[in-house]
Image (cartoon, rainbow, N blue to C red):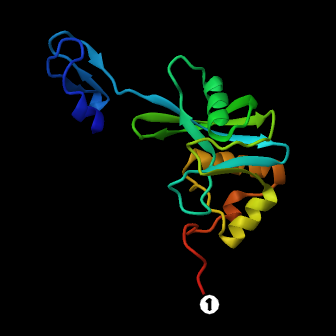
Amino acid sequence: LGWHSTHRFCANCGVETAVELSGWQRKCPACGTSHFPRTDPAFIILVTWRDACLLGRQPSWAPGRWSTLASFVEPGETLEDAVRREVREEAGVRVGDCEYHSSQPWPFPASLMLGFTARADDPHIAVGAELAEARWFEADDLVRGLAERSVVLPPPLSVSYRLIEHWLRSSAGLELRDLMHDEPWLAPRRA
């Protein structure tokens, strides 16, 4: 809907376009140019160092909420270079190898979220301006934090959840779904 409201006119000749293909395309009746929604690649990364994974917190988040690091791909940048750049900018961690893991549609503003795993070359953290905090979590840290409700992770529908889930299963043989609470953002109920 956002794309249709902001792209009513042909970028080639200025004539009002018509909706086609059930809204997946707009076509100019004057010059015949077809217009399609723009998709910007965004990415999210789970970085590991030995038996730990790197999670960060944005300044606007509630205490205890953690996630993998994420950003957008800059023009002219490969996905792998974007992963290395962003982890270095946000957390000060140098990343070497990185691999594609999975994806999800991400409508903010019109993106495709690409999930990666990466290995740190050096575990030293130097938090950049975009994060309030970053730290390494071992499996035991997450298990304890989730049990105490002092750690809140992304919901199961997100790539971030799937990245953490994959790491926890691979590194510790644990299933994240067995550790998550149905209402992780709420404080424990008092007896």
**In the image, residue 141 lies at what x, y percent?**
77, 60
Amino acid carrying mark 1 in the image: Ala
**Is residue 29 rendered to the left or right of residue 50?**
left
* Rendered view: 116 above or below 187: above
Give the image quarter of residue 155. Answer: bottom right
Regarding residue 101, the answer to whether it shows in the image is no
Q: Secondary structure at mark 1?
A: loop
Residue 147 in the figure: left or right of residue 32? right
Question: What residue lies at 54% left-to-right and 53% top-to-bottom?
Answer: 59
Q: Give the residue displayed 62% in from the left and 34% down from the top.
A: 89
Would residue 44 be found to the left or right of residue 170 on screen?
A: left
**At 53% across and 57% down in the image, what residue appears?**
61
Residue 118: image location, x then y, percent = 73, 35
Q: Which residue is mark 1?
A: 191
| Quadrant where the C terminus is found in the figure | bottom right
Placement of 121 over or under 55, stated as above or below: above
Q: Considering only vertical position in the picture, is 113 above or below 187?
A: above
